[in-house]
Amino acid sequence: MTDQVELTDEAEPLEPLPAVPEEDQAPRIVPSPLRTLQRRWLADRPRAVDAIGLAVLALVAAFLWGRAAGMAFWLDEGISVGVAAHPLHSIPHLLLQDGSPPLYYLLLHLWISVTGSSDTAVHLLSLLFGVATVPAALWAGWSLFDRRTGWICALVVAVNPFVAYYATETRMYSMAILLAVLATATFLHVYVFGRRRYLPWFALSLAALLYTHNWGLLLGLGAGVALLALLVLSRDRRRLVVDGVIGFGGVAVLYAPWAPSLAYQMGQHLQPWGRKADLVWVRDDLAVMLGGNEVFVALGLGVGVGIAAMVQSRGWTRQALGVLALGVITVVTLALGWRGSVWAYRYLAVVAAPVMLLVGVGLARAGRTGVAALAVAAFLAGPVAVRGPAYQKSNVEAVASEVSARLRPGDLVVLPDFQMVPLAAHYLPSGLRYSTTSGLVPDRNIVDWRHVIDRLVNDDPATTLPPLLDTLPPGAHVLFMCPPPGEETDGTGLAQAQGIEKRGSAATAVTGDQGLLAKTVPLPQDVAMHPLISVRCQQASDLLTKRPGLEVQEVLQPPDGVRYTSVDAWMFIKR
């Protein structure tokens, strides 16, 4: 048995071996560039795998979601494109009639100026925001918690049907989801984990969200309440107060230029379609946002298990405080939206970010239970999120394609549903005149929502339409479009109700001089926007069909499966 010698720092250094002559040395092998890259890749394998995985996930999402990019616009998308068609400098002022902040429309204007205004090109802007939300969620979960949480957050976003749908909607909601993810994550970085370098990014991202959608104010208030909760639980309250003044003060300074416009909008009753929600409505919308009731239950169980495990095993760590802050932001934002004057499912774009981050954290801490819950969500919600356009949003584009060849500059388009004017103008030829039951529309690319209920109540088609019809020369056309009156006609609208024989996508009048409406419908007792529009549609159609010298040339009806903006259309010619 030999003795073992322990080498220490005090051991005598060994003498170097004598040098070998250069001519006797073995030839030096220089590795190939490919082998060098391979070694570097192996050394950075985790990063390389993550980069490849993220690229694949984003590309798959872009491909699957993008299949609906060519779908024709519906009413709200027509409004978006109409606003963006105006000069850049005039958009903020025009939005005083609309009720929205200006940032999305400014970006859409720039986007259209580069790509054009085709359905596919315009939809791609929202698709970019939607796909960008996947790496944003990965970064948020990873940088705040850990790698596992980041990937689960990214997967939760990738299989979410809400994100998928608005990734192909020409509205601001996809952009709002992305900005809400960034604002929520940077808030946690600054006020939970004490990383002050994120202060300017928090102020910028939250201010950008406020300039994108008004519900950003609710998320900002939720973040403020979360900061108060952190002040109660934190030992470093002075730092939180200072950072709170800097961060939220910066948001206030950035948003101050738009505050007078918001104050004006709030006094104009710009959301006449809105209704207050009850708690059942809120619950149901949340369930649909996550993928349906089954997904809602599965994710709820997974998140509950994960958060319980986190609190029991570690107590109030910074990560636990981060979960608390996410919960407070979510609850306060939803509560303010619920108690506010207007609730809409699409407005959940703002609150979707803290919800999905909270789900990602909870599932990551739930172990196998979290993986199982995520698998259930992917199986049940994924097909909903990625399926192609199984329906049409609107048949306005189809109507325009059938009648455009016969329309000439100066012809009249009558739209009692005033909010459809920008959509019709987007697809119909230029040079036409547009009228609602209030009279000629001064700007076909903007909807004036100010006190619209008062205007609808005071409208009288018998007063406004005849003078316009009198200005038409013989041979001129009148295109009349209105939503079908309701489900009582199985979606085929006024034409079938009054004896119009349907032939494919078009129909021919067989009623002679008989009006399309047999009676005048009284004003509804609860004066609301859509019933009023229905009444004005019926009054206007009765006037046009009984007008001497106007002859029905063609009646077009919506096909089965039109989901949002379906219209009955009549083409008249003046004899």
Image (cartoon, rainbow, N blue to C red):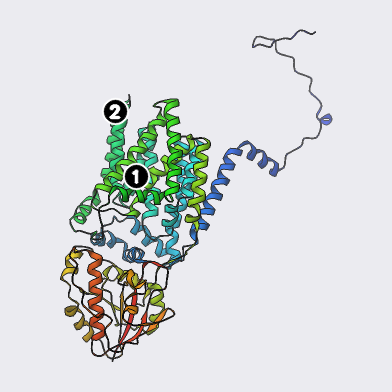
Q: Kindly identify the residue that appears in the image at 81 percent across and 25 percent down.
A: 20
The amino acid type, in three-letter code, at marker 1 is Leu
The C terminus is located in which quarter?
bottom left
Q: In the rendered image, which residue does mark 1 sit on?
A: 204
Question: Which residue lies most toward the front here?
Answer: 488
Q: Earlier in the sequence, mark 1 or mark 2?
A: 1
Q: Is residue 363 above or below residue 101?
A: above
Q: Quadrant of residue 434?
A: bottom left
Q: Secondary structure at mark 1?
A: helix
Q: Which residue is tagged 2?
A: 232
**Residue 500 image offset from top left, x and y in percent:** 35, 82
Q: Secondary structure at mark 2?
A: helix
Q: In 3D space, how far apart are the residues under numbered discs 1 and 2 (Cα atoms)?
A: 26 Å
User: Which residue is rendered at x = 38% and y = 81% of the image?
Assistant: 403
Q: Where in the figure is residue 546, as x and y percent of width and height? A: 24, 86
> What amino acid is found at the position of numbered circle 2 in the picture?
Val
Q: Quadrant of residue 410?
A: bottom left
The answer to whether one can see residue 51 in this image is: yes
The residue drawn where x is 64% and y is 12% is 9
Is residue 375 left or right of 72 when viewed as pictured?
right
Task: Tell me the tag on residue 466.
Answer: none
